[in-house]
Amino acid sequence: MSIHARFNLSRGDFTLNAELQVPSSGITAIYGPSGCGKTTLLRAVAGLESCANGFFSLENEIWQDESRYLHPHQRSIGYVFQEANLFPHLSVTGNLEYGLKRTPTSRQKLGFNQVIEMLGVGPFLQRRPMHLSGGERQRVAIARALLTSPRLLLMDEPLSALDQNSKAEIFPFLERLRDELAMPVLYVSHSADEVARLADHLVLMSAGEIRASGAIDEMLTRTDLPLAHGDEAESIIKARIVSHDETYALTYVDFAGGRFTVPRKDLATGRSARLRILARDVSLTLEKQTDTSILNIFPGIVAELVDENPSQVLVRLEMEGVNILSRITRKSAATLNLEPGKHVYIQVKSVALLA
């Protein structure tokens, strides 16, 4: 099942000409620079931007085509904006009940207490918005949207107005929402960090058009896209927590190509996780090193080499079907005589374990 959208509209000197088809599950990040049309696309999905020849369907239910147009209030959506937009004269409970009362009892899929617990807003139910931090206000806004029991949740840069501490506070709640709710989310962002932590699927936009779309781990390692280039080029590896080493404060994480050792993180064994690895933190050798402090070393195959600049090369490698990027000097690539199909050992100097 999928979400299918097609919109062509003009606003002044800007034109949105976008078509996408993405899974109707998990978080799909709509990513790109400011002004590329991310919010316009989201508003078109919500029915807030009129588009005479537009099309939108969710799991084969058509909300908009040449003969049918559901107005925003007729579309089963929850919308979370950059600002929380809470009612200042109401308590948190009052704001949440507003969302709940909009939904007929027969359509209510998420219970009041369930949403409160999921977003961790219980401790401040009696407060008014002015007495909440930025992160707390945004959690209440998300909870209010969820209490309408939408079939689709739209989030327009919900963390952009928050400072780093507030973002760190809210991330675990967004990750929980992603992992526990069978609800598709379209998440607009221009933050690579947010996309890496939260997205299952990625839509890359540029100048009002969809440049590419796919699973997050595949998109980040495509050398034909700008995501794979630059200082922050990275790989995301889907993995599973298998055990903890109390003696050395380590956590062991399995993926298709082997086992990573990372600093201990208090996560339950058996749960899924993702690993984030910067291309600049991956080095290559022809023989497996034993007299080294690097713990994460895996056999792999060179899949592709791309010149980055006069001094550096980007190498895409495969480990049992998993892609990882490495940025090394052109001299190193020549010394190792790297070419597609060559077997190497991949040394990961630093890795971040994301929940």
Image: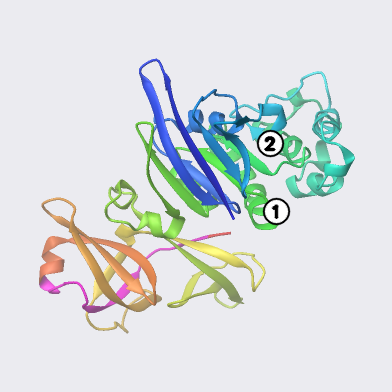
Give the spatial CA distance, label 1 vs label 2: 14 Å
Question: Could you tell me if residue 62 is visible in this image?
Answer: yes
| Mark 1 or 2, nearer chain start | 2
Q: Residues within 10 Å of mark 2 (few under 14, many from 20)?
A: many
Is 94 rendered above or below residue 247?
A: above
269 relative position to 302: left or right: right
Q: Quadrant of residue 312?
A: bottom left
Element at label 2: strand
350 relative position to 85: left or right: left
Identify which residue, 256 or 160, lies in the foreground. Answer: 256
Identify which residue, 178 or 75, lies in the foreground. Answer: 75
Query: How is this picture coloured?
Result: rainbow
Residue 78: give its label: 2
Identify which residue, 337 or 6, lies in the foreground. Answer: 6
Q: Is residue 344 magenta?
A: yes
Is 300 rendered above or below residue 333?
A: below
Residue 181: give its label: 1
Q: Which residues are magenta?
A: 335-353
The location of residue 97, given as percent across then percent down, is 85, 32
Q: Residue at x 55, y 41 (%)?
A: 187
Q: Residues within 10 Å of mark 1 (few under 14, many from 20)?
A: few
Is 152 rendered above or below residue 343?
A: above
Q: Quadrant of residue 147?
A: top right
- Amino acid type of the residue tagged 2 in the rendering: Gly
Residue extending furthest right? 105
Q: Residue at x 15, y 67 (%)?
A: 332
- Amino acid type of the residue tagged 1 in the rendering: Leu
Residue 316: give its label: none
147 relative position to 167: left or right: right
Q: Quadrant of the C terminus?
A: bottom right
